[in-house]
Every structure is written in structure tokens, then in C-alpha cells.
């Protein structure tokens, strides 16, 4: 368990993937993931805030609730970024990665079923 604030906020989790795998992600379907880096952006405005949500995402063995839960066994955590701003910033952060020429969307609608963003998961060959 990582010591994080229990306040609400927005987070960005960076993972590395070392092998090519085929993963079924709930109703989104089956996808191939490739070795490189994956960045997942989310928000934690519920009970327990950032501490509870991020630590849950870092665990591997759990009931699948979020899209990331299906992908998590294939990914290794590398970096954690977060903000305790009281405004949800996940869509703004996702917009920044959409504009980054070094990142791409590996799975459309991943993590963005409650907004109009094309995805909240990004793929890149660099951190």
C-alpha cells in the first residue's frame, strides 16, 4: 500500500508492459497489448479519495469493476501523478495526451464511459 492523500483528486498512473498479450476487457472486447508504456488517467472523488482508488488500481487480484482491472495483471506500475484539486481534471489531462504526438489511444473508450473523451488510456514508447 502506497501512502497517498485520502483527499479527492485526479490521477495519472504510468505502467510498463514487457510482453505482447491478448486481453478481454469487459464489454469493450478483446485487444492485443504490446510492450511499451501505458498511461491511465482517472479521478477519485468517492470515499477514500486518491489513497483508496490508486491503491486499488495497483492491486492485481480483485473483482473487475473498472476497465483498468482487466488490463492491470499485464502492467507494472512505474509512476504515479496526482492532483488534490477539487475540480475533476481527468478530461483536461486526457486532452493533453491526445495532443501529444508521442502518445496514441490503444483502446477506444477505455476508462471514458462516463464522459465524451475518446479514451483515458494512452500508449507511448517513452515515459
Image (cartoon, grey):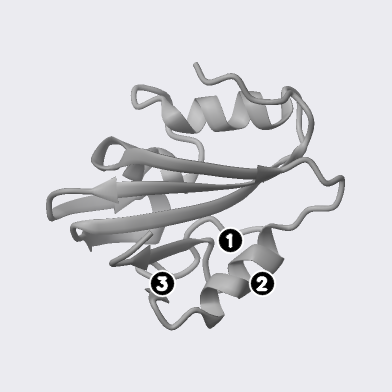
Q: Is residue 118 above or below residue 2?
A: below
- Residue at the extreme right: 86
In-image side of 116 versus 41 (left or right)? right
Look at mark 2 in the image and give the residue it sits on: 116
In-image side of 35 versus 89 (left or right)? left
Residue 91 image-quadrant placement: bottom right
Which residue is depicted at the point 40% across and 59% down?
Answer: 28
Earlier residue among tags 3 and 2: 3
Residue 64 image-quadrant placement: top left
- Which mark, residue 54? none
Mark 2 touches mark 1? (CB < 8 Å): yes
Look at mark 1 in the image and give the residue it sits on: 112
Mark 3 touches mark 1? (CB < 8 Å): no
Q: Secondary structure at mark 1?
A: loop
Q: Is residue 6 above or below residue 109?
A: above
Look at mark 3 in the image and give the residue it sits on: 105
Q: Secondary structure at mark 2?
A: loop
Q: Nearer the viewer, mark 3 or mark 2?
A: 3
Amino acid at each position: 500500500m502506497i501512502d497517498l492523500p485520502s483527499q479527492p483528486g485526479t490521477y495519472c498512473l504510468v505502467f510498463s508492459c514487457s510482453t505482447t498479450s491478448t486481453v478481454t476487457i469487459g464489454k469493450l472486447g478483446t485487444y492485443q497489448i504490446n510492450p511499451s508504456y501505458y498511461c491511465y488517467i482517472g479521478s477519485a472523488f468517492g470515499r477514500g479519495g486518491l489513497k483508496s482508488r490508486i491503491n486499488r488500481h495497483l492491486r492485481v487480484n480483485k473483482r473487475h469493476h473498472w476497465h483498468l482491472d482487466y488490463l492491470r495483471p499485464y502492467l507494472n506500475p512505474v509512476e504515479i501523478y496526482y492532483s488534490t484539486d477539487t475540480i475533476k481534471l481527468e478530461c483536461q489531462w486526457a486532452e493533453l495526451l491526445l495532443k501529444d504526438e508521442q502518445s496514441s489511444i490503444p483502446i477506444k473508450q477505455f476508462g471514458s464511459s462516463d464522459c465524451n473523451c475518446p479514451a483515458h488510456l494512452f500508449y507511448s514508447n517513452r515515459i
